[in-house]
Image: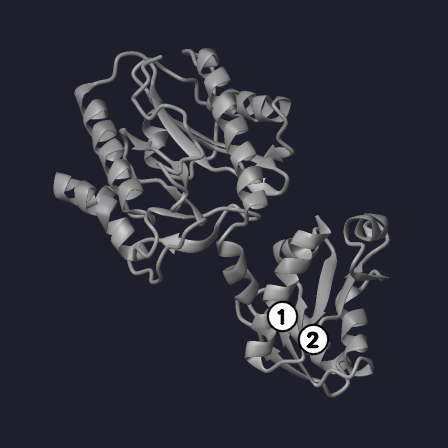
Amino acid sequence: MPEIHAARRRRAQEKIAETGADAALITAGPNVRYLTGLASSNAALLLAADGAAVLATDSRYTLAAQRDCPDVEVISERFIETRLAAELAGRGLRTVAFEAHEMTVERHAELVARAGGVTVIPFGRKIEELRTVKDPSEIELLGTACRISCQAIADTFALIRPGLTERQLAAALDARMTALGAERPAFDTIVASGPNGAIPHHAPTDRPLRRGDLITMDFGALYGGYHADMTRTVALGEPAGWQREIYELVAAAQRAGLDAARPDADVADVDAAARDLIRDAGHGDHFQHGLGHGVGLEIHEAPAIGYGRTGKLASRVPVTVEPGVYLPGRGGVRIEDVLVVGAGGTGLLTTTTRELLVL
């Protein structure tokens, strides 16, 4: 899809021109992939404001870069940043913007030392801003990742039984996503049962599942570089009254958050739509993480939806909506879906039932 990446680079060049720089040195891996199509653990892009693009990577990825980025000059070099730094003065560049949020102090010092008098200035998160609104090809890839995730959890529900451990359940879910076409899990799968459900990012253990447990599963498939992210909480055996109560509360809060996530909505207001319901039910202290975040080439992207956050949502921005209630020593509930804001209808990419399943 060279034409898609070329269009993205043109938008990036407008951002470069706004800074007054002659070029930008893009070193964050997801940003390099977004602008070129190259997936690599060692690549950087020198993008001039007036058109020229130079992609540096090492011999492990050179053939892939030449294949996937036919309209970009490719340099094969192990030490990519120092090579591109040496290119700056020779290409007549006077001011170059760099990704200060990604570059270490040590790397910056080396960049300045090798830049031959070229002025380097912070670029900010300009490419991440471009990545926030997804084009149709990105939404299609993310949609596939979400469909794989939904099918995987549907297939895995039948395996949940007393005696199965959290670790075994996580492994089964991961294997099913891979069998359905995922590159790999989008992140380390969370399975939290019984009292472990009170820990939002609990790492699966050898604790066996027991009747009376609530079981929270937070997982997602990676497909085409795009990360799905969804959470479901189920009951193993008939749930107690308190378990149904917090489940229904979280489900209502999630519906409120989904309804509030519309174009031009303030992210803090979207968070408040869900958080206020939980607070008013007396569980404000039991929901302390943000309501959601963007997803795409990274599992956590802009925008962040939470209290104290600023900014507005826009159309074609995929976000998670994931309220929870966590009761120390007892258990917890989280429900999470991926919503494409302003996509028409509900915009939900994850469609697994949000009703409490009793297994």
Classify mark 2: residues with Cα within 10 Å, few (<14), some (14-19) or many (20+): few
Answer with mark 2 or mark 1, whichever residue precedes in sequence: 1
Mark number displayed over residue 50: 2
From the viewer's perspective, tell me whether residue 9 is left or right of residue 124: right
**Where residue 188 sits in the image (x, y, percent)?**
53, 36
Q: Nearer the viewer, residue 94 or 265?
A: 265
Q: Quadrant of residue 121?
A: bottom right
Instruction: Judge from the rendering whether residue 134 lies leftward or rightward of residue 64; answer left or right.
Output: left
Residue type at numbered disc 2: Asp
Q: Residue at x 82, y 56 (%)?
A: 58
Report the amino acid beneath label 1: Gln
Where the C terminus falls, by quadrant? top left
Cβ–Cβ under 8 Å for marks 2 and 1:
yes
- Of helix, strand and loop, which one carries label 2? loop
- Distance from disc 2 to disc 1, alpha carbons, whole Å, reads 7 Å
Residue name at image x 53 percent, y 42 percent: 139
Q: Is residue 193 left or right of residue 19?
A: left
Question: Is residue 28 in view from this perspective?
Answer: no
Please tell me which residue is depicted at 79% across the width and 62% down the height of the picture.
Answer: 56
Residue 147 located left or right of residue 269: right
Which of the two residues, 1 or 141, is positioned nearer the viewer here? 1
Q: Which residue is mark 1?
A: 13
- Residue 96, position in %: x, y? 66, 78
